[in-house]
Image (tube, coloured by chain):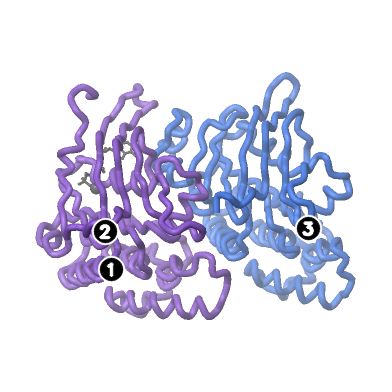
Amino acid sequence: MMPGVGVKPVLRASGLSKRFVLHNQGGVELPVLEGVAFEAFPGECIALDGPSGAGKSTLLKLIYANYRASTGSVHVRHDDGVQAGAEVDMTRASAQTLLAVRRSTIGYVSQFLRTVPRVGSLDVVAEPLLAGTGADPEALRDAHRQAQDLLLRLRIPQRLWHVAPATFSGGEQQRINLARSFVRDWPVLLLDEPTASLDASNSATVVALINEVRKRGTTVIGIFHDAHIREQVATRVLDMGCFQPGPRSR
Amino acid sequence: MTDNPPLLRVQGVTMHYGARRAVDDVSFDLWPGEVLAVVGESGSGKTTLLNAVAARVKPDAGRVGFMTRHDGMVDVYSMSEAQRRLLARTDWGYVHQDAVQGLRMNVSAGANVGERLMALGERHYGRIRTEAANWLQRVEMDAGRIDDTPATFSGGMRQRLQIARNLVTRPRLVFMDEPTSGLDVSVQAKLLDLLRTLTRGLSLAAIVVTHDLAVARLLAHRMMVMKEGRVVETGLTDQVLDDPQHPYTQLLVSSVLQP
Ligand SMILES: Nc1ncnc2c1ncn2[C@@H]1O[C@H](COP(=O)(O)OP(=O)(O)OP(=O)(O)O)[C@@H](O)[C@H]1O
Ligand SMILES: [Mg+2]
C-alpha cells in the first residue's frame, strides 16, 4: 500500500549500521549491516528478505534498541503523553525513554520467550496491558478477559492458562509470546519468524491477526521464512541484500 | 517521562581502602520505580558502592542526592544523623546478603516487622500485629509463625522476613546486596519471583548488587557493570546482556550459559 500524500512515516532508519567486535576472540570484527535506510508507514507490513545470516534479526533488534547501533539512527514516532507524535531516536534515547517506547509504541515478538518461573500464562499474556495501572482490580479483570480471548484464538488449552510457560512445547511458547504481543495494539510491531514452530491452523490465525492489526494502522516489520505466509501478510518486501557491508569493511 | 527528576542522584562517589580505590568516581541516576542491577566479580567494589550510596559508609568524595518527600533533592551526607536514620528506617530499605545482619534474631517475626512501624510512631499493638501478619502473607510466609523467632527459620524464610521488615513502611527505594545468594537454587527462584512481583507491584526503586547475571535479567530494568571500582558499561538489561560492548562485560556474559 502506498502512503497518501502528507502521511508521515512512523519509523525511519537512516545510515544505520551494526558491527560486532568480539574482544575475547582476538578483537575480530563482524560487520553485519551497513547503510540501512528505509521508512515505514502506518498500515504497512514490511517483510525483511534475505538469506540466513543476512542480519534480519539484527535489524529488528536494532529497531527495538536491544542491540546498540554502530552508526546511524532509527526515529520512531512516540506519543509520550506530552507531545503526540514526537520522534525518539532509538539509537540515542535514554533508558527511561526506551522503556517508555517499549511500553506503548513498539511491540516485539522474539523467537524465544523468556518466562518468569512462576507466572502463569494468563498473567504473562495480560502483562503488557497492565503497565502503569497499579493493582486496579477492574483493569486486571479487563486485561484477563482480553488475554483469554487471545489464548482461545491461538488454541492454548484452558488447563494451561494458569501454568507457567517454562515447561511448554516450542509451539506453545511461541503462541504465548504472540498472544502477549497481540493483546494490545502497537503503532509498530516487530515479528521474528512468528510462525516458525506453528501448525497450519495456528499459522492461519497469526496471518489473520497480523492483517487485523495492520488494518487498524499498526506498522508490522517482520521476518517470514515461509513464502506462503509472507504472500498473505506482506504489503512490501525489503531486500536485505542492499544493506550488506561492502568489501572495504570486511 | 525523562523530564521527571530522578529519585537518587549519585555523583563522583569514590572510596579508598588504604591506597587502593575500591570505588572510583561512580555517577548514576535512579528513577522512581526503576530497578538497577550492579554486577561484577567479587572485589569489584559493588558492596562498597552500595554502602556509600545507602548512607551507611561516608565516601571519600562524591555526593548522593535523594529526592525527599518534602524538601526536594537533599544530599544525604549533609543531613543530620537523626534525619538520615529516619530516612533509612522509613523511605529506604536495606536487604542484607546475610539475613542475620538485617534481622533481630532473638525477637519474634512479628516484632521484626513491627519495629519499623514503631519507628514511625505507631504504638497501637493490635494494628502493628495485623500489619505484620499481612506482610508475612505478602512475602508468602505462614502467618502462624508470627510469634516464632527467626532463629528457628530456614535461610529462605529469613530472607522473606527481612524483605517484609523492610517493605512494611512502604519505602520508595530499597538497597539489596546479593539478596538470593547463599540459598538453594529452588529457594532462590521463588525468592526472585517474589522480589520481581513486589518491586513491579509497588513501583519500588531498587539497587540490586549481584554477581548473578540471571538475577539481573529477571529483576532489573537497567544494569551497571563494575570492574576494579569503575563502571565499565551501563545500559538496559537486555542491551548489556545481549550485546555487551566492553571486553570485561563480554567475558562475564560468555562465561555463563544463557543469562
Ligand atoms: N550478539 C551477537 N554477537 C555477535 N554476533 C552476532 C550477534 N547477533 C548476531 N550476530 C551475527 O550477525 C549476523 C547476522 O545474524 P542475524 O541473526 O541477524 O541473521 P538472520 O538474517 O536473522 O539469519 P537467520 O535467517 O538465520 O535467522 C550473524 O553472522 C550472527 O552471527
Ligand atoms: Mg533470524
Q: Is residue B187 visible?
A: no
Question: Chain in purple?
Answer: A
Disc nearest the viewer among 3 and 1: 1
Amino acid type of disc 1? Val
Marks 1,2: beta carbons within 8 A: yes
Determine the chain carrying the residue at label 1: A
Amino acid type of disc 2? Val
Question: Chain in blue?
Answer: B
Along the viewing direction, whichever of A87 and B227 lies nearer the viewer: A87
Whole-number angstrom distance, CA of label 3 to CA of label 2: 47 Å
Residue labelled with disc 2: A220
Residue labelled with disc 3: B90
- The tag earlier along the polypeptide, 1 or 2, is 1
At which x and y percent is residue B28? 61, 39
Residue labelled with disc 1: A213
Q: Is residue B193 visible?
A: yes
The local crowd at label 1, few if under 14, some if 14 to 19, many if 20 or more residues have their Cα within 10 Å, is many
Q: Is mark 2 within 8 Å of ligand 2?
A: no
Determine the chain carrying the residue at label 3: B
Toward the top, the furthest residue is B19
The quadrant holding residue A27 is top left
At which x and y percent is residue B23? 66, 30
Indicate whether A83 appears above or below B21. below
Amino acid type of disc 3? Thr
